[in-house]
Amino acid sequence: MTTRTSDGFNRWQIAAKVAPFGIIALAGMAVRTPLAASYPFVALVLSLWIVSDTLMLALLARSSGKPECRAVLGVLAGASFTVWLGLPSPVRGVLLETPALALMMVVVVVGHVAWAMARASRVLSRLSSDRREQWVSAISEIFPPALVRLAAAELTVIHMALFRWGGPADVPTNAHAFAYHKHLTPMCVMLLVLSAIEIAVYHLLIGHWSHIASVVMFILSDVGFVYLVGVIKSFRFRPVLLTPEGVRVRAGFLIDQLVPLDAIVAIESNFTGEEVRASATLNAALLAWPNIMLRLDRPLPRRSFLKKREPFNRIAFRLDDPEPFIRLLIWRLGHRTN
C-alpha cells in the first residue's frame, strides 16, 4: 500500500511538472486557429486566462502550503510575458489596441522585476564564501529557480569542456581529495573516438539525403560531443572529498552526495553483487566495480531529475587508490564527536 501511494504521488509530481508545458503549447496552437482570428479579443482573453490558471495550478501543486505573494506575482508576470511572446500578429495588435489590459500586464511584469531585483540585491550584499551559489540564488529571485539552476549547470558543463584544460581540481579548504578518474581514462578516450566517428558518419551519410538534416544533426552531434567532453573532464576536476562534515562522494557532474560522518557505521572493501545492486545502495562507481562501500546507520535521501527515489543506507564507489582514503576515514571516525 505504501509503495502504491508513493508511486501515485511521484506520478502526480511528474504530471504537475510536465502538464503545464503541454497545456500552454495547446493554448498557443488554439490562438492561431481561424476561429481565433475571427474573434481576436476573445482569443486574447482566453489565452491569458488559460496560461495564468495553468501556471497558478502548477504553483499550488508544488507548494506544500499557501504560496507566497512573491511567487504569485512571479506566476502572473510569467503568464503575461508568455502570452505576449506567443501571440500571433493579429491578436497582438488587439492587445496593443486595448491599453487597459496591456497596461495591467506591463505593471505586473515591472512590479515582479522591481521586487525581485530588490530581493536579489539583498542576497548579493550578504557575505558568502560561495559566490557562484550566491549569484544563482540572486538570479533565482527574478527567474524560475529550476530554470536558473538548469542554465547554471549547462554553463558549468560548457565552461568545463571548452575552457578548463589544466590546473588543480576543485578541492575546498580543509578537504582531502581522492581521485577516481584514472581507471576511467581508457574508456573515456574510446567514447570520445566513437563520438567523433559518429559525427563524421552522420555528416557524410545524411548530407547525401538532405543538406538541412545534415546541418541539424551535425549541430546536435557537436553539442553532444561538447557535453561529453565536459562530463569526462569533470571526473578529474571533481574528486571524492573527505571533509570535516563527512564524505562527499562525487562522480563528475553526475553524482554529488554528502554522507555525514555520524551516519557511517562501517567501511567495507569486500561485498557481494547483490548488495551493490540492491535498491537501498547508491552505486557511484562508473563503468567499473566499486572497491569501497560505506554502511550507514540511517537512510539518506536521494533525488533524481523528475521524481523522488528510495533513500539509501549504503553507498558504493571506486577510488584509484582506496587505502589512504580508508586509513584517513577510519582515523576521522575514531576521533569524531559522539
Image (cartoon, rainbow, N blue to C red):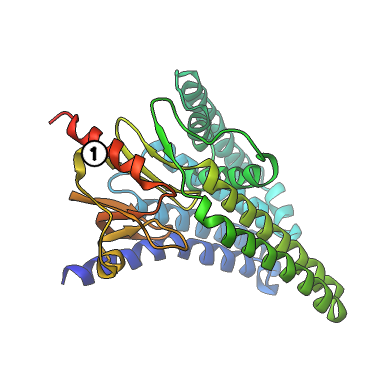
**Residue nearer the viewer, 17 or 99:** 17
In the picture shown, does residue 239 fall above or below 309?
A: above
On the image, which quarter does residue 89 sit in?
A: bottom right
Residue at horizontal 44 percent and vertical 59 percent from the top: 17
Q: Is residue 233 left or right of residue 129?
A: right
Extreme-bottom residue of the structure: 209
Q: Quadrant of the N terminus?
A: bottom left
Residue 293 % position (x, y): 28, 54
Question: In x, y percent, where is residue 323?
Answer: 34, 44
Question: Mark 1 highlights which residue?
Answer: 330
Depicted 141 relative to depicted 219: above or below: above
295 vs 251, left or right, is: left
| Residue 47 in sight | yes
Circle 1 Cα neighbour tier, 10 Å, few/some/many (<14 / 14–19 / ≥20)? some
Q: Is residue 226 left or right of residue 184?
A: right
Residue shown at 45% from the left, 18% from the top: 127
Q: Amino acid at mark 1?
A: Ile
